[in-house]
Image (cartoon, rainbow, N blue to C red):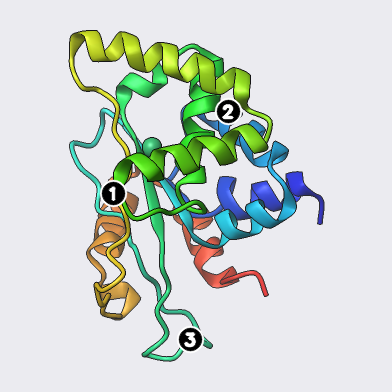
């Protein structure tokens, strides 16, 4: 499969971008660009565990699953998921800054340090290695602008490595209940969702 096909399978046609259904055009374009440009190893790591929540004015809040049970996972198998929540402010960024932001947040899923400042530096270093120096500058410019008004930049929280995430039946998961509700409300394509769930994970 080509990278473009992988991106379509892993992110665009699956349940990685919440709420499900048509996603924000600029966001989708920027995400495809970042995912197209990063090295294979980074892509594999990200494709294995990163989800997105993009602000949608139809919803006040969204519960997104952070773990899943699919055969052949056993009960004790822990699947770690990083959810990147994208808020409205980011969608008003100039395109280059949005690309920089997505690259930065994705880098947090790979570069992890113990404290916040080291974590930020490690993420930015990786983003520059990936070739997004220009976009990172555009991002800094937007973040400085935002700081003059209010702290509007959201960073993902560091993983709590000690947290035991309990597995449960997928259908009983609050997010799946929310998904069922959304399907009933017509906000989500039932066919697309069911097809995805049946297809299961890529081997
Ligand atoms: Zn950060």
| Of the pair 125 and 153, the residue shown nearer to us | 125
Query: Residue 188 versus residue 28: which sits nearer the camera?
Result: 28
x, y percentage for residue 112?
Answer: 43, 54
| Relative to 187, 46 lies left or right | right
Question: Do the residues under discs 1 and 3 have CB atoms within 8 angstroms?
Answer: no
Residue 73 - label:
3
- The residue shown at (47%, 80%) is 70
Q: How far apart are the two marked residues, 1 and 3, measured between alpha carbons?
A: 26 Å
Residue at left 61%, top 24%?
133
Across and down, in percent, residue 142 comes to 39, 13
| Nearest the eye: 186 or 17 | 17
Tell me which corner region of the image, top left, top right, bottom left or bottom right, holds residue 151: top left
Farthest residue, direction right? 2
| Circle 3 Cα neighbour tier, 10 Å, few/some/many (<14 / 14–19 / ≥20) | few
Mark 2 or mark 1: which comes first in sequence? 2
Compared to residue 33, the image places residue 62 above or below, namely below
Q: Quadrant of the N terminus?
A: bottom right
Query: Could you say whether the residue bearing mark 1 is in a helix, strand or loop?
Result: loop
Q: In this view, does 75 lie above or below 5?
A: below
Q: Distance between the residues labelled 3 and 2?
A: 33 Å
Q: Can residue 129 be seen in this view?
A: yes
* Residue under the point 41% across and 62% down: 81
Q: Position of residue 4 (x, y in %)?
A: 74, 44
| Residue at 44% from the left image edge and 51% from the top image edge | 51
**Label 2 crowding class (10 Å Cα cut-off): few <14, some 14-19, many 20+?**
many
Task: Confirm if mark 1 falls within 8 A of ligand 1.
Answer: no
Whole-percent x, y for residue 158 in the image: 31, 53
The residue identified by callout 2 is 30
Location of mark 1 (residue): 157
Dots 3 and 2: beta carbons under 8 Å? no
Inspect this view and state whether residue 25 appears: no
Q: Is mark 2 on a helix, strand or loop?
A: helix
């Amino acid at each position: 499969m080509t990278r473009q096909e992988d991106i379509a399978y892993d992110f665009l046609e699956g349940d990685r971008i919440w709420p499900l259904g048509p996603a924000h055009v600029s966001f989708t374009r920027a995400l495809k660009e970042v995912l197209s440009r990063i090295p294979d190893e980074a892509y594999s790591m990200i494709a294995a565990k990163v989800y997105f929540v993009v602000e949608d004015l139809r919803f006040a809040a969204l519960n997104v699953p952070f773990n899943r049970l699919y055969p052949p996972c056993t009960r004790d198998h822990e699947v770690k998921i990083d959810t990147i929540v994208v808020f409205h402010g980011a969608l008003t960024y100039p395109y280059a800054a949005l690309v920089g932001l997505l690259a930065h947040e994705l880098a947090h899923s790979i570069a992890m340090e113990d404290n916040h400042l080291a974590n930020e530096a490690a993420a930015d270093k990786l983003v520059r290695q990936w070739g997004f120096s220009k976009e990172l500058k555009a991002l800094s410019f937007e973040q400085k602008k935002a700081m003059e008004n209010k702290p509007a930049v959201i960073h993902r929280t560091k993983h709590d490595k000690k947290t035991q995430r309990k597995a449960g039946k997928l259908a009983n998961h609050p997010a799946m209940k929310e998904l069922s509700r959304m399907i009933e409300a017509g906000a989500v394509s039932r066919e697309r969702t069911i097809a995805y769930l049946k297809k299961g994970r890529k081997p």
